[in-house]
Amino acid sequence: MVTYNSEKVITACLTSLEASAIPTKIVLVDNGSDDATLDIVRRDFPNVIAVEVSNLGFAGGCNYGVRLAGDEVDTYFFLNPDASVTSTCLGKLLNSLAYDERMAVVSPTILDPGTGQIEYAGAKLDFETLDFEVLSSIDVATKDASGTIETGRPGGAGMLVRGESLEAVGLMDESYFLYWEECEWASRFRRSGLKIGYVPDAVVFHTPHHSAGGAGSKIYEYYWTRNALRLVEDVEGDSKLRTLRRLRPLLTRRLRDLAHLREFALLATAIPFDALGVVDFLRGKSGHRQGLPSSQARNASSE
């Protein structure tokens, strides 16, 4: 688990893990919080292995946690601190991996606890059509609620990874820093002949955009745009200009959606930071972008 200023959500998350029917070894990597996150963890959850590091980003924090967990680990469960698991979630995910040895990563149904809406029910990862859509309840309404459904990419808020598969393809690419790193990871698993799965009756509750703020926030717009371009360039091997031309409709559609929703304040923030993401992509910039806030929620209630 990677945290950053997670004092408002960390208790619910760790409590849910400790109540899981499957026992867990919990490793928490804090990316330099300046709130009481670590104080709460060390006071209330003494069995959690908690360390503080400089801000390594999501991928870097996850990789640090993997190394800290040690070598004798069969499976790694990556969970956002603003998420909580149902008691049977881990068991159902483990059963899915046990059933199919080519299944490298499985994710549960991810629900918004406030609205009950499905945030993740599988997702596409099609580099020919540039279709990266996350599937919703409408998309899976006719599917069987049991078993495992092969899908394009995992849900970053909650995913169980087979240790042998991780060793085969390597850790996440830390130079992405934030956003799209699990998609680049999924592309490596798939190129190795491994599969990504979605387990409908395993459930995680997730409050979206706790740290980064979502569409319209500075860090979301910058990293989402820069890394989407980089992902396609890395996987397809196209030139930067051809990659930009291919993704231009996707990038502009996001801005049109904000305009259509009359989110003009967010649009005013999105445009310059999307542009900065494009410029830095063309310049070959990666990793942490100096000058951006470490975390930015859209409003106080979203934290």
Image (cartoon, rainbow, N blue to C red):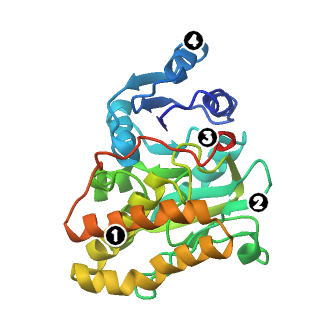
Q: Give the CA distance from mark 3 to mark 4.
A: 19 Å
Q: Give the CA distance from mark 2 to mark 3.
A: 16 Å
1 or 3: tag closer to the N-terminus: 3
- Is residue 180 in view? no
Q: What type is the residue that disc 2 sits on? A: Gln
Q: Residue at x 28, y 75 (%)?
A: 233
Q: Give the CA distance from mark 1 to mark 4.
A: 40 Å
Q: What type is the residue that disc 1 sits on? A: Leu
3 or 4: tag closer to the N-terminus: 4
Label 3, secondary structure: give it: loop
Q: Give the CA distance from mark 1 to mark 3.
A: 26 Å
Q: Using the image, tell me which numbered label, if any, was put on residue 231.
A: 1
The crowd level at tag 3 (other Cα within 10 Å; few <14, some 14-19, many 20+) is: many
Q: Name the residue under label 4.
A: 43
Q: Using the image, tell me which numbered label, if any, was put on residue 82.
A: 3
Question: Residue 24: horizontal and vertical position, in percent?
Answer: 55, 32
- Is residue 267 in view? yes
As drawn, is 277 to the left or to the right of 263?
left
Q: Is residue 107 above or below residue 16?
A: below
2 or 3: tag closer to the N-terminus: 3
Q: Using the image, tell me which numbered label, if any, was put on residue 251.
A: none
Q: In which quarter of the image is residue 49?
A: top left
Q: Using the image, tell me which numbered label, if any, was put on residue 117.
A: 2
Question: Residue 301: horizontal and vertical position, in percent?
Answer: 69, 41
